[in-house]
Image (cartoon, rainbow, N blue to C red):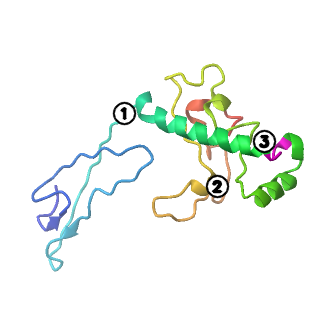
């Protein structure tokens, strides 16, 4: 409901409600609402409802398998070049070896794989889907800079979520 002077061409004429399914990790713009006659006052009130739908494994499993294959290949390349904490010992030495080889660091001792988080049954459908990202790949919808902690770090700054491992955080 709202002003008769408002319009959203994306929705069509006289549409007061729309339903959208947003895939995980994506941002969807529902439309732009603007006044029909800018010289006439207008107002709008909006309500949003959402329903959380648990992802089925057949949706995300192909993405997980693709990621894990890529991660395994990257880790094998790191091992082949001797770029491991066991061989190089210091962060500076690992950084230099990565820069020299053009590789991005992948921790072979704590790999970005389900086995690092779910040791008992990594492929159980009860495990939440995990998306591993490098810090540089985490962006806001407007591509502005992301800050993990802005001013103060306190006990409510991080929520441990479904992993239930506060030490991991």
Q: Which residue shows up at 59% across the image and 43% down it?
A: 132
Q: Which mark is residue 53?
A: 1
Please state which of the two labelled residues, at mark 3 or mark 1, is closer to the viewer: 3
Which badge, 2 or 3, comes first in the chain's sequence?
3
Residue at image position (13%, 68%) is 5
x 49%, y 23%: residue:
125
Q: CA distance from mark 3 to mark 1?
A: 40 Å
Residue 148 in sight from this viewpoint: no
Vertically, is 53 above or below 103?
A: above
Among the 4 quarters of the image, the one containing residue 138: bottom right
Earlier-in-chain disc, 3 versus 1: 1
Question: What are the residue bounds of the magenta stretch?
Answer: 81-85
Determine which residue is flagged by label 3: 79
Residue 149 is tagged as 2
Q: In the figure, is residue 105 to the left or right of 46?
A: right
Residue 160 lies in magenta, yes or no?
no
Closer to the camera, 79 or 35?
79
């Amino acid at each position: 409901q709202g002003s008769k002077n408002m319009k959203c061409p994306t929705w069509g004429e006289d549409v007061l409600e729309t339903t959208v399914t947003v895939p995980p990790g994506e941002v969807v713009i529902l439309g732009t609402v603007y006044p029909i006659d800018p010289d006439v006052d207008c107002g709008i009130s909006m309500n949003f409802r959402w329903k959380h739908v648990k992802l089925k494994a057949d949706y995300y499993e192909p993405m997980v398998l693709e990621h894990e294959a890529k991660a395994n290949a990257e880790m094998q390349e790191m091992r082949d070049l001797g770029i491991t904490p066991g061989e190089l010992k210091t962060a500076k030495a690992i950084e230099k070896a990565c820069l020299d080889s053009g590789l991005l660091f992948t921790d072979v001792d704590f790999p970005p794989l389900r086995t690092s988080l779910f040791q008992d049954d990594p492929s159980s459908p009860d495990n939440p889907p995990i998306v591993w990202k490098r810090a540089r790949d985490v962006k806001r919808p407007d591509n502005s800079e992301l800050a993990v902690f802005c001013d103060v770090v306190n006990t409510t700054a991080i929520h441990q979520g479904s992993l239930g491992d506060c030490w991991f955080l």
